Amino acid sequence: VVTYLHETKEIEIKLWPNPVGSQLNLQYDKPVKELKLYDQLMREIRPYWNNNGSFYTIDMNGLRRGIYHLRINGMNVKHRFLKL
């Protein structure tokens, strides 16, 4: 089940599951080089570099419960999800 879909002229992104437990999955229609994870206060948690093409899985183990945001390729498109 896709729980988030964002489509702009730049990129279409699917993000699931939301809320997330141990893994967050992302799928996109164009190459993504950099993903940045932020906490709810928009403090950067960690960057990720993707070499897998159109699919990426982020390990969420070790992160506290709460709201997180993803920024993709430095675009102003941000994605919000809940960590359980």
Image (cartoon, rainbow, N blue to C red):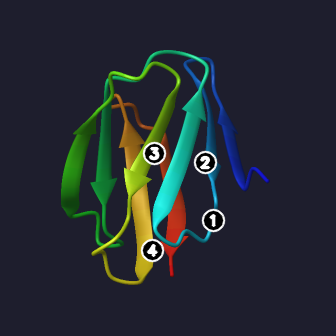
Q: Amino acid at mark 3?
A: Thr
**Residue 42: quarter of image:** bottom left
Q: Amino acid at mark 4?
A: Ile
Q: Residues within 10 Å of mark 3 (few under 14, many from 20)?
A: some
Vertical arrangement, residue 69 with respect to residue 71, above or below: below
Residue placed most toward the observer, 34 or 10? 34
As helix, strand or loop, the secondary structure at mark 3 comes to strand
Q: Which residue is mark 2?
A: 15
Q: Earlier in the sequence, mark 3 or mark 1?
A: 1
Q: Which labelled disc corresponds to residue 57?
A: 3
Q: Earlier in the sequence, mark 4 or mark 1?
A: 1
CA separation in Å, label 4 and label 1:
10 Å
Q: Which residue is mark 4?
A: 67
Callout 1–callout 2 Cβ contact below 8 Å? yes
Q: Residue 55's spot in the image, x, y percent?
A: 52, 31
CA separation in Å, label 4 and label 2:
14 Å
The residue at the point 20 percent across, 58 percent down is: 44
Q: Residues within 10 Å of mark 4 (few under 14, many from 20)?
A: some
Q: Which residue is mark 1?
A: 18
Q: Amino acid at mark 1?
A: Asn
